[in-house]
Amino acid sequence: MPHIQLPEGLPGIRGPMAFSPETAKPLNELANALLQTDEGLSRAERELIATYVSSENDCFFCQTIHGAVASYYWGDENGEFVKAVKENYGLTAISAKLKALLAIAGSVQKGGKQVTPEQVQEARQQGATDKDIHDTVLIAAAFCMFNRYVDGLATWAPENPELYKFRATRIAESGYTADDHYMPK
């Protein structure tokens, strides 16, 4: 049961965004700026970072929806690849660069000062640019905020993975929008 009265039937962040359209617009613009570009990091890599941080924060809605978007981009039909990344990215078939960036993202999730010069150096040695490192830190920081927004208001999240796949397709095709709150039940 949400801590405040949110519009009925809108899961996760969708409810608070419908409740507060004046904040939904800039939050969606931030999500689009961070996730809906292939400049430097790909959309798939960006969504995987968001998914990993949301998983580390134990935010069911965010890790599930962004995991579904990441799966869409990676061609991961059954979600097993994304699940493996969340469980132990070091054992997955992602690039050494992305592994180094996920290490940075994991440190940001614990606290910004947890990022070490050694982690940044490792990311650079694996081919990460300053832009890649910047975007990784900002995605991780933003998703800590998004996760706390969703869970701090005790929003509800459906358990049916097909609903997240449906929503992921819409996000991949149209981006994050402040006025599209539809998600089937």
Image (cartoon, rainbow, N blue to C red):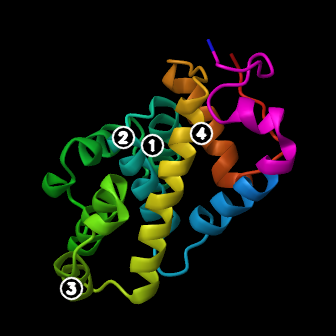
N-term mark: 2 or 3? 2
Which of discs 1 and 3 lies nearer the camera? The answer is 3
Judged from the image, the secondary structure of the residue bearing numbered disc 3 is helix
Instruction: Check disc 3: other Cα within 10 Å, few if <14, some if 14-19, many if 20+.
Output: few
The quadrant of the rendering that contains the C terminus is top right
Please give left or right for residue 56 compared with residue 59 in the image: left
Q: Residue type at mark 3? A: Gln
Residue 168 sits inside the magenta stretch: no
Q: Residue type at mark 1? A: Gly
Judged from the image, the secondary structure of the residue bearing numbered disc 1 is helix
Q: Do the residues labelled 2 and 1 touch (CB within 8 Å)?
A: yes
Image height check: is 132 above or below 88? below
Q: At 56% from the left edge and 22% from the top edge, which residue is drawn?
A: 157
The answer to whether one can see residue 175 in this image is no
Image height check: is 10 above or below 27? above
Which residue bears the numbered disc 4?
149
Which residue bears the numbered disc 3?
121
**Where is residue 152 drawn, in percent x and y?**
55, 31
Span colored in magenta: 2-24
Which of discs 2 and 4 lies nearer the camera? The answer is 4
Q: Residue type at mark 2? A: Ser
Q: Residue type at mark 4? A: Tyr
Q: Which residue lies furthest to the front in this view?
A: 113
Judged from the image, the secondary structure of the residue bearing numbered disc 4 is helix
Instruction: Check disc 1: other Cα within 10 Å, few if <14, some if 14-19, many if 20+.
Output: many
Q: At 27% from the left edge and 70% from the top edge, which residue is drawn?
A: 115
Whole-angstrom CA distance, mark 3 to mark 4, is 32 Å
Q: Which dot marks residue 55?
A: 2
Q: Which of 87 and 82 is in front in this view?
A: 87
